Image: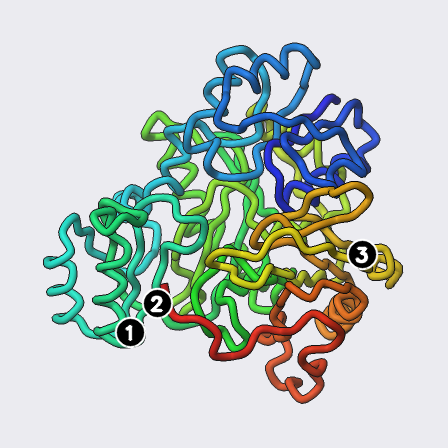
Amino acid sequence: MNVLILGSGAREHALARACAKSPQRGRLFVAPGNPGCAEVGVNVPMDLSNHEEIGAFCRKEAINLVIVGPEVPLVAGIADRLANQGTLCFGPSRAASRLEGSKGFAKDFCREFGVPTARYRRFSGREEAKRFVQERGAPIVIKADGLASGKGVVVAKTTEEAERAVESLFLANGLVASQLLVEEFLEGEEVSFFALCNGSTATPFSSAQDHKRVGDGDTGPNTGGMGAYSAPPVMTPQLSERVMREIIMPTVRGMRARGTPYCGVLFAGLMVTEEGPKLIEFNVRFGDPEAEVILARLADDLPPLLHACAKGDLVPDPHFSSEVALAVVMAAKGYPGDPIRGAIIRGIERAEQIPGVTVLHGGTRKDGDAIVADGGRVLTITATGGDVREARKRAYSAIDLIDWPDGFYRRDIGWRAIANETADMPERGKKSVQSVSNDRGESV
Protein backbone atom coordinates (compact mmCIF):
# COMPACT_ATOMS: atom_id res chain seq x y z
CA MET A 1 0.00 0.00 0.00
CA ASN A 2 1.51 3.32 -1.12
CA VAL A 3 0.69 6.03 1.43
CA LEU A 4 0.94 9.82 1.34
CA ILE A 5 0.67 11.71 4.65
CA LEU A 6 -0.06 15.44 4.46
CA GLY A 7 1.46 17.66 7.15
CA SER A 8 4.72 18.57 8.83
CA GLY A 9 4.26 18.30 12.60
CA ALA A 10 4.84 15.78 15.37
CA ARG A 11 1.40 14.29 14.63
CA GLU A 12 2.52 13.50 11.09
CA HIS A 13 5.81 12.07 12.35
CA ALA A 14 3.80 9.77 14.65
CA LEU A 15 1.52 8.76 11.76
CA ALA A 16 4.54 8.11 9.54
CA ARG A 17 6.19 5.91 12.17
CA ALA A 18 2.97 3.92 12.57
CA CYS A 19 2.59 3.46 8.82
CA ALA A 20 6.26 2.52 8.42
CA LYS A 21 5.72 -0.48 10.73
CA SER A 22 2.86 -1.86 8.62
CA PRO A 23 3.37 -5.27 6.95
CA GLN A 24 1.33 -3.84 4.07
CA ARG A 25 3.66 -0.90 3.58
CA GLY A 26 4.69 0.01 0.06
CA ARG A 27 6.18 3.44 -0.48
CA LEU A 28 5.63 6.07 2.21
CA PHE A 29 5.65 9.80 1.45
CA VAL A 30 5.11 12.79 3.74
CA ALA A 31 4.37 16.26 2.35
CA PRO A 32 6.07 18.45 3.28
CA GLY A 33 7.24 16.40 6.28
CA ASN A 34 10.08 17.18 8.66
CA PRO A 35 13.49 15.70 9.54
CA GLY A 36 11.87 13.01 11.69
CA CYS A 37 9.51 11.96 8.89
CA ALA A 38 12.51 11.67 6.54
CA GLU A 39 13.90 8.89 8.76
CA VAL A 40 10.95 6.58 7.97
CA GLY A 41 9.65 7.87 4.62
CA VAL A 42 10.33 10.28 1.79
CA ASN A 43 9.61 13.97 2.31
CA VAL A 44 7.97 15.75 -0.61
CA PRO A 45 8.19 19.58 -0.70
CA MET A 46 4.58 20.35 -1.63
CA ASP A 47 2.33 23.27 -0.78
CA LEU A 48 -0.73 21.81 0.98
CA SER A 49 -2.93 24.56 -0.43
CA ASN A 50 -2.11 23.41 -3.97
CA HIS A 51 -4.66 20.62 -4.38
CA GLU A 52 -3.88 20.16 -8.06
CA GLU A 53 -0.24 19.43 -7.28
CA ILE A 54 -1.22 16.93 -4.58
CA GLY A 55 -3.63 15.20 -6.94
CA ALA A 56 -1.02 14.98 -9.68
CA PHE A 57 1.52 13.51 -7.27
CA CYS A 58 -0.98 10.85 -6.19
CA ARG A 59 -1.56 9.82 -9.79
CA LYS A 60 2.15 9.77 -10.61
CA GLU A 61 3.13 7.68 -7.57
CA ALA A 62 0.05 5.39 -7.59
CA ILE A 63 -0.91 6.42 -4.06
CA ASN A 64 -3.42 4.02 -2.49
CA LEU A 65 -4.24 6.13 0.56
CA VAL A 66 -3.83 9.77 1.53
CA ILE A 67 -3.86 10.53 5.27
CA VAL A 68 -4.52 14.19 6.04
CA GLY A 69 -2.95 15.40 9.26
CA PRO A 70 -3.93 19.09 9.73
CA GLU A 71 -7.40 20.56 9.54
CA VAL A 72 -6.79 23.39 7.04
CA PRO A 73 -6.56 21.18 3.89
CA LEU A 74 -9.69 19.29 4.95
CA VAL A 75 -11.71 22.46 5.51
CA ALA A 76 -10.44 23.65 2.11
CA GLY A 77 -11.73 20.49 0.39
CA ILE A 78 -8.69 18.30 -0.30
CA ALA A 79 -10.73 15.13 0.30
CA ASP A 80 -13.24 16.20 -2.36
CA ARG A 81 -10.46 16.95 -4.85
CA LEU A 82 -8.90 13.53 -4.34
CA ALA A 83 -12.26 11.72 -4.44
CA ASN A 84 -12.97 13.30 -7.84
CA GLN A 85 -9.92 11.56 -9.29
CA GLY A 86 -10.53 8.26 -7.49
CA THR A 87 -7.81 8.56 -4.83
CA LEU A 88 -8.81 7.28 -1.38
CA CYS A 89 -8.44 9.91 1.31
CA PHE A 90 -8.69 9.40 5.05
CA GLY A 91 -10.44 12.60 6.05
CA PRO A 92 -13.89 14.16 5.72
CA SER A 93 -15.25 16.17 2.83
CA ARG A 94 -15.29 19.95 2.83
CA ALA A 95 -18.96 19.95 3.84
CA ALA A 96 -18.40 17.48 6.69
CA SER A 97 -15.31 19.40 7.84
CA ARG A 98 -17.55 22.29 8.83
CA LEU A 99 -17.84 20.50 12.16
CA GLU A 100 -14.42 21.99 12.89
CA GLY A 101 -14.31 24.80 10.36
CA SER A 102 -17.22 26.64 12.00
CA LYS A 103 -17.87 26.37 15.71
CA GLY A 104 -21.21 28.08 15.10
CA PHE A 105 -22.20 25.37 12.62
CA ALA A 106 -21.12 22.67 15.08
CA LYS A 107 -23.15 24.15 17.93
CA ASP A 108 -26.24 24.53 15.74
CA PHE A 109 -25.73 20.93 14.57
CA CYS A 110 -25.63 19.73 18.19
CA ARG A 111 -28.87 21.52 18.93
CA GLU A 112 -30.54 20.02 15.85
CA PHE A 113 -29.50 16.43 16.57
CA GLY A 114 -29.59 16.40 20.35
CA VAL A 115 -25.85 16.20 21.07
CA PRO A 116 -25.28 17.41 24.66
CA THR A 117 -23.21 20.59 24.77
CA ALA A 118 -22.91 23.90 26.61
CA ARG A 119 -25.58 26.56 26.19
CA TYR A 120 -24.43 29.27 23.78
CA ARG A 121 -25.22 32.38 21.77
CA ARG A 122 -23.74 33.50 18.44
CA PHE A 123 -22.75 37.12 17.80
CA SER A 124 -21.60 39.16 14.82
CA GLY A 125 -21.25 42.44 16.73
CA ARG A 126 -18.90 43.16 19.60
CA GLU A 127 -21.18 45.49 21.55
CA GLU A 128 -24.03 42.99 21.60
CA ALA A 129 -21.64 40.26 22.69
CA LYS A 130 -20.23 42.40 25.49
CA ARG A 131 -23.70 43.28 26.75
CA PHE A 132 -24.52 39.57 26.88
CA VAL A 133 -21.32 38.91 28.83
CA GLN A 134 -22.21 41.64 31.31
CA GLU A 135 -25.67 40.14 31.80
CA ARG A 136 -24.42 36.58 32.27
CA GLY A 137 -21.24 37.26 34.25
CA ALA A 138 -18.20 35.04 34.63
CA PRO A 139 -16.72 32.50 34.36
CA ILE A 140 -17.72 32.34 30.70
CA VAL A 141 -16.19 31.06 27.46
CA ILE A 142 -15.50 33.16 24.35
CA LYS A 143 -14.77 31.35 21.06
CA ALA A 144 -13.82 32.55 17.60
CA ASP A 145 -16.09 30.93 15.02
CA GLY A 146 -13.40 29.88 12.54
CA LEU A 147 -10.10 28.00 12.61
CA ALA A 148 -7.62 29.51 15.05
CA SER A 149 -4.94 26.81 15.57
CA GLY A 150 -6.04 26.13 19.13
CA LYS A 151 -5.71 29.79 20.11
CA GLY A 152 -9.22 31.10 19.47
CA VAL A 153 -10.76 30.15 22.81
CA VAL A 154 -10.70 32.18 26.01
CA VAL A 155 -12.00 30.83 29.31
CA ALA A 156 -12.65 34.15 31.03
CA LYS A 157 -12.66 34.21 34.82
CA THR A 158 -13.97 37.80 35.00
CA THR A 159 -16.34 39.89 32.89
CA GLU A 160 -13.47 42.29 32.16
CA GLU A 161 -11.38 39.46 30.76
CA ALA A 162 -14.36 38.29 28.69
CA GLU A 163 -14.88 41.78 27.26
CA ARG A 164 -11.21 41.97 26.27
CA ALA A 165 -11.57 38.60 24.57
CA VAL A 166 -14.58 39.80 22.59
CA GLU A 167 -12.55 42.78 21.35
CA SER A 168 -9.49 40.72 20.46
CA LEU A 169 -11.25 37.91 18.61
CA PHE A 170 -13.19 39.97 16.09
CA LEU A 171 -11.93 40.32 12.55
CA ALA A 172 -12.51 44.08 12.72
CA ASN A 173 -9.51 44.20 15.04
CA GLY A 174 -7.43 42.29 12.50
CA LEU A 175 -7.60 38.94 14.25
CA VAL A 176 -9.39 35.68 13.66
CA ALA A 177 -13.17 35.87 13.51
CA SER A 178 -16.08 37.65 11.88
CA GLN A 179 -18.39 35.91 14.35
CA LEU A 180 -17.91 34.52 17.81
CA LEU A 181 -19.74 32.39 20.33
CA VAL A 182 -20.30 33.01 24.00
CA GLU A 183 -20.84 29.78 25.94
CA GLU A 184 -21.59 28.75 29.47
CA PHE A 185 -18.61 27.56 31.46
CA LEU A 186 -18.66 23.80 32.03
CA GLU A 187 -17.12 22.25 35.11
CA GLY A 188 -15.61 18.79 35.08
CA GLU A 189 -12.73 16.85 33.58
CA GLU A 190 -11.76 17.48 29.96
CA VAL A 191 -11.12 14.50 27.66
CA SER A 192 -10.26 14.07 23.99
CA PHE A 193 -12.25 11.17 22.50
CA PHE A 194 -11.56 9.70 19.06
CA ALA A 195 -13.70 7.53 16.79
CA LEU A 196 -13.12 6.11 13.31
CA CYS A 197 -16.14 6.81 11.08
CA ASN A 198 -17.00 5.26 7.72
CA GLY A 199 -19.96 7.48 6.83
CA SER A 200 -22.65 5.37 8.44
CA THR A 201 -21.21 4.00 11.66
CA ALA A 202 -18.22 4.45 13.97
CA THR A 203 -15.88 2.60 16.31
CA PRO A 204 -14.01 4.12 19.26
CA PHE A 205 -10.30 4.83 18.78
CA SER A 206 -9.12 5.47 22.34
CA SER A 207 -8.92 8.78 24.24
CA ALA A 208 -6.41 11.15 25.79
CA GLN A 209 -6.13 14.18 28.02
CA ASP A 210 -4.47 17.26 26.55
CA HIS A 211 -2.88 20.23 28.34
CA LYS A 212 -3.79 23.38 26.40
CA ARG A 213 -2.49 26.18 28.60
CA VAL A 214 1.12 27.20 28.09
CA GLY A 215 2.12 27.18 31.74
CA ASP A 216 2.32 24.80 34.68
CA GLY A 217 -0.86 24.66 36.70
CA ASP A 218 -2.90 25.36 33.54
CA THR A 219 -1.90 29.03 33.48
CA GLY A 220 -1.31 31.45 30.62
CA PRO A 221 -2.80 31.49 27.12
CA ASN A 222 -4.17 28.52 25.22
CA THR A 223 -1.87 26.78 22.77
CA GLY A 224 -2.14 23.95 20.28
CA GLY A 225 -1.28 21.60 23.15
CA MET A 226 1.71 21.30 25.52
CA GLY A 227 1.38 17.62 26.34
CA ALA A 228 -1.01 14.70 26.67
CA TYR A 229 -1.40 11.20 28.06
CA SER A 230 -3.46 8.14 27.17
CA ALA A 231 -5.54 6.47 28.35
CA PRO A 232 -7.06 8.75 31.00
CA PRO A 233 -8.52 6.98 34.05
CA VAL A 234 -11.76 8.97 33.76
CA MET A 235 -12.58 7.28 30.43
CA THR A 236 -14.03 4.03 31.74
CA PRO A 237 -15.64 1.47 29.40
CA GLN A 238 -19.03 2.66 30.64
CA LEU A 239 -18.25 6.30 29.86
CA SER A 240 -16.83 5.36 26.45
CA GLU A 241 -20.06 3.54 25.61
CA ARG A 242 -22.07 6.58 26.69
CA VAL A 243 -19.97 8.93 24.57
CA MET A 244 -20.52 6.69 21.55
CA ARG A 245 -24.26 6.51 22.21
CA GLU A 246 -24.95 10.14 23.07
CA ILE A 247 -22.35 12.07 21.03
CA ILE A 248 -20.54 10.12 18.31
CA MET A 249 -23.38 8.10 16.77
CA PRO A 250 -25.93 10.99 16.77
CA THR A 251 -23.26 13.00 14.94
CA VAL A 252 -22.62 10.28 12.37
CA ARG A 253 -26.37 9.82 11.80
CA GLY A 254 -26.97 13.56 11.64
CA MET A 255 -24.24 14.16 9.08
CA ARG A 256 -25.58 11.34 6.94
CA ALA A 257 -29.12 12.71 7.21
CA ARG A 258 -27.81 16.09 6.00
CA GLY A 259 -26.32 14.45 2.91
CA THR A 260 -22.75 15.04 4.11
CA PRO A 261 -21.63 11.64 5.49
CA TYR A 262 -18.63 11.79 7.77
CA CYS A 263 -15.63 9.59 6.86
CA GLY A 264 -12.42 9.85 8.84
CA VAL A 265 -11.48 10.29 12.46
CA LEU A 266 -13.91 12.31 14.56
CA PHE A 267 -12.28 14.02 17.52
CA ALA A 268 -14.77 15.03 20.20
CA GLY A 269 -13.39 17.38 22.81
CA LEU A 270 -15.48 16.59 25.90
CA MET A 271 -16.15 17.87 29.38
CA VAL A 272 -17.14 15.10 31.74
CA THR A 273 -19.60 16.91 34.01
CA GLU A 274 -21.78 15.72 36.87
CA GLU A 275 -24.58 15.41 34.31
CA GLY A 276 -22.46 13.31 31.98
CA PRO A 277 -20.25 14.00 28.96
CA LYS A 278 -20.86 17.22 27.03
CA LEU A 279 -19.27 18.30 23.78
CA ILE A 280 -16.88 21.24 23.94
CA GLU A 281 -15.93 21.14 20.27
CA PHE A 282 -15.41 18.84 17.29
CA ASN A 283 -12.17 18.39 15.38
CA VAL A 284 -12.01 16.55 12.07
CA ARG A 285 -8.50 15.08 12.34
CA PHE A 286 -6.18 13.44 14.82
CA GLY A 287 -5.25 15.78 17.61
CA ASP A 288 -1.74 17.00 18.28
CA PRO A 289 -0.31 15.96 20.78
CA GLU A 290 -3.11 13.41 21.37
CA ALA A 291 -2.19 11.42 18.26
CA GLU A 292 1.32 10.93 19.56
CA VAL A 293 0.17 9.15 22.72
CA ILE A 294 -2.72 7.21 21.20
CA LEU A 295 -0.61 5.85 18.33
CA ALA A 296 2.12 4.90 20.81
CA ARG A 297 -0.41 2.50 22.37
CA LEU A 298 -1.95 1.13 19.15
CA ALA A 299 -1.36 -2.62 18.88
CA ASP A 300 -2.97 -3.04 15.44
CA ASP A 301 -1.77 -2.19 11.94
CA LEU A 302 -2.80 1.42 11.26
CA PRO A 303 -3.06 1.72 7.42
CA PRO A 304 -5.71 -1.03 6.98
CA LEU A 305 -7.91 0.64 9.61
CA LEU A 306 -7.72 4.02 7.89
CA HIS A 307 -8.09 2.45 4.44
CA ALA A 308 -11.33 0.75 5.54
CA CYS A 309 -12.69 4.08 6.78
CA ALA A 310 -11.84 5.84 3.54
CA LYS A 311 -13.58 3.11 1.51
CA GLY A 312 -16.68 3.18 3.72
CA ASP A 313 -16.09 -0.38 4.91
CA LEU A 314 -16.80 -1.65 8.40
CA VAL A 315 -13.87 -0.87 10.68
CA PRO A 316 -12.90 -3.60 13.17
CA ASP A 317 -12.45 -2.60 16.81
CA PRO A 318 -8.79 -1.57 17.17
CA HIS A 319 -6.66 -3.00 19.96
CA PHE A 320 -4.47 -0.90 22.25
CA SER A 321 -1.73 -1.74 24.70
CA SER A 322 -2.57 -1.60 28.39
CA GLU A 323 0.47 0.62 28.89
CA VAL A 324 0.17 4.37 29.42
CA ALA A 325 1.73 6.80 26.95
CA LEU A 326 2.63 10.36 27.94
CA ALA A 327 3.95 13.16 25.74
CA VAL A 328 5.63 16.43 26.67
CA VAL A 329 5.91 19.20 24.09
CA MET A 330 9.13 21.21 23.98
CA ALA A 331 8.29 24.61 22.54
CA ALA A 332 10.41 27.56 21.46
CA LYS A 333 10.55 30.55 23.79
CA GLY A 334 8.01 33.10 22.64
CA TYR A 335 5.35 30.49 21.80
CA PRO A 336 2.35 30.81 21.44
CA GLY A 337 3.42 34.23 20.17
CA ASP A 338 6.51 34.71 18.00
CA PRO A 339 8.85 31.76 18.66
CA ILE A 340 12.64 31.99 18.59
CA ARG A 341 13.95 30.10 15.56
CA GLY A 342 17.32 28.85 14.38
CA ALA A 343 18.86 27.40 17.57
CA ILE A 344 20.64 24.05 17.27
CA ILE A 345 19.09 21.17 19.25
CA ARG A 346 21.44 18.54 20.60
CA GLY A 347 20.96 15.32 22.49
CA ILE A 348 17.97 13.79 20.68
CA GLU A 349 19.84 10.53 20.13
CA ARG A 350 20.74 10.29 23.82
CA ALA A 351 17.12 10.92 24.82
CA GLU A 352 15.87 8.08 22.60
CA GLN A 353 18.16 5.60 24.36
CA ILE A 354 15.82 5.65 27.38
CA PRO A 355 13.48 2.63 27.16
CA GLY A 356 10.03 3.47 25.83
CA VAL A 357 11.00 6.98 24.64
CA THR A 358 10.44 8.40 21.16
CA VAL A 359 11.34 11.96 20.15
CA LEU A 360 8.90 13.22 17.53
CA HIS A 361 9.79 16.19 15.35
CA GLY A 362 7.40 19.10 14.88
CA GLY A 363 8.85 22.52 14.10
CA THR A 364 12.37 21.42 13.13
CA ARG A 365 14.56 21.58 10.04
CA LYS A 366 17.97 20.28 9.02
CA ASP A 367 20.93 22.66 8.73
CA GLY A 368 23.68 20.47 7.40
CA ASP A 369 23.89 17.63 9.90
CA ALA A 370 22.29 19.68 12.70
CA ILE A 371 18.66 19.80 13.81
CA VAL A 372 17.48 23.37 14.42
CA ALA A 373 14.26 24.84 15.83
CA ASP A 374 11.94 26.23 13.17
CA GLY A 375 8.52 26.64 14.75
CA GLY A 376 6.50 26.97 17.94
CA ARG A 377 5.98 23.40 19.13
CA VAL A 378 9.33 21.93 18.13
CA LEU A 379 9.67 18.46 19.68
CA THR A 380 7.25 16.04 21.34
CA ILE A 381 8.89 13.61 23.72
CA THR A 382 6.66 10.54 24.03
CA ALA A 383 7.20 7.77 26.55
CA THR A 384 5.34 4.61 27.49
CA GLY A 385 5.21 2.90 30.87
CA GLY A 386 3.21 0.66 33.12
CA ASP A 387 1.44 3.70 34.59
CA VAL A 388 1.39 7.47 34.26
CA ARG A 389 4.13 7.92 36.83
CA GLU A 390 6.55 5.63 34.99
CA ALA A 391 5.79 7.12 31.57
CA ARG A 392 6.20 10.65 32.91
CA LYS A 393 9.50 9.82 34.63
CA ARG A 394 10.87 8.46 31.35
CA ALA A 395 9.68 11.47 29.35
CA TYR A 396 11.21 14.04 31.68
CA SER A 397 14.42 12.02 32.02
CA ALA A 398 14.69 12.16 28.23
CA ILE A 399 14.10 15.92 28.19
CA ASP A 400 16.93 16.37 30.70
CA LEU A 401 19.27 14.91 28.06
CA ILE A 402 18.22 17.39 25.36
CA ASP A 403 20.34 20.53 25.06
CA TRP A 404 18.28 23.41 23.68
CA PRO A 405 18.66 26.72 25.56
CA ASP A 406 15.84 28.41 23.64
CA GLY A 407 13.24 25.78 24.57
CA PHE A 408 10.73 25.43 27.39
CA TYR A 409 8.14 22.90 28.49
CA ARG A 410 5.60 22.14 31.17
CA ARG A 411 6.68 20.02 34.13
CA ASP A 412 3.19 18.91 35.17
CA ILE A 413 1.90 16.85 32.25
CA GLY A 414 -0.34 14.09 33.61
CA TRP A 415 -1.12 15.94 36.83
CA ARG A 416 -4.78 14.97 36.80
CA ALA A 417 -3.95 11.28 36.84
CA ILE A 418 -1.56 11.66 39.78
CA ALA A 419 -3.00 14.68 41.55
CA ASN A 420 -2.15 13.22 44.95
CA GLU A 421 1.48 12.59 44.02
CA THR A 422 2.65 16.10 43.10
CA ALA A 423 5.38 15.99 45.73
CA ASP A 424 7.14 13.48 43.48
CA MET A 425 7.19 15.76 40.42
CA PRO A 426 10.69 16.27 38.94
CA GLU A 427 12.48 19.46 39.89
CA ARG A 428 12.07 22.42 37.58
CA GLY A 429 14.63 23.75 35.19
CA LYS A 430 17.25 21.02 34.83
CA LYS A 431 19.95 21.23 32.19
CA SER A 432 19.71 24.07 29.71
CA VAL A 433 16.01 23.76 28.97
CA GLN A 434 13.89 25.69 31.46
CA SER A 435 10.31 24.87 32.35
CA VAL A 436 7.92 27.77 31.90
CA SER A 437 6.95 29.66 35.02
CA ASN A 438 3.41 29.51 36.41
CA ASP A 439 2.62 33.14 35.68
CA ARG A 440 3.97 33.27 32.15
CA GLY A 441 1.78 35.12 29.65
CA GLU A 442 -1.62 36.73 29.55
CA SER A 443 -4.88 35.30 28.23
CA VAL A 444 -5.39 35.76 24.51
Image point 74% across, 43% down: which residue?
367
- Residue 379: x, y in percent? 67, 55
Q: Are marks 2 and 1 in contact (CB under 8 Å)?
A: yes
Q: Nearer the viewer, residue 430 or 419?
A: 430
Identify residue type, mark 1.
Answer: Pro
**Residue 348 bears which disc, if any?**
3
Determine the CA span between mark 2 and mark 1.
7 Å
Identify the residue position indicated by label 1 in the image.
139
Identify the residue position indicated by label 2 in the image.
155
Number of numbered markers: 3
Identify residue type, mark 2.
Answer: Val
Question: Which part of the image, by quadrant, shows the C terminus?
Answer: bottom left
Disc with the residue nearer the chain's start (3 vs 2): 2
Image point 36% across, 58% down: which residue?
153
Query: Neighbour class for label 1 at 10 Å: few (<14), some, many (≥20)?
Result: some
Q: Nearer the viewer, residue 139 or 367?
A: 367
Q: Nearer the viewer, mark 3 or mark 2?
A: 3
Determine the CA span between mark 3 and mark 1.
42 Å
Q: How is the image coloured?
A: rainbow
Callout 3 secondary element: helix
| Rendered position, 206 above or below 5 | below
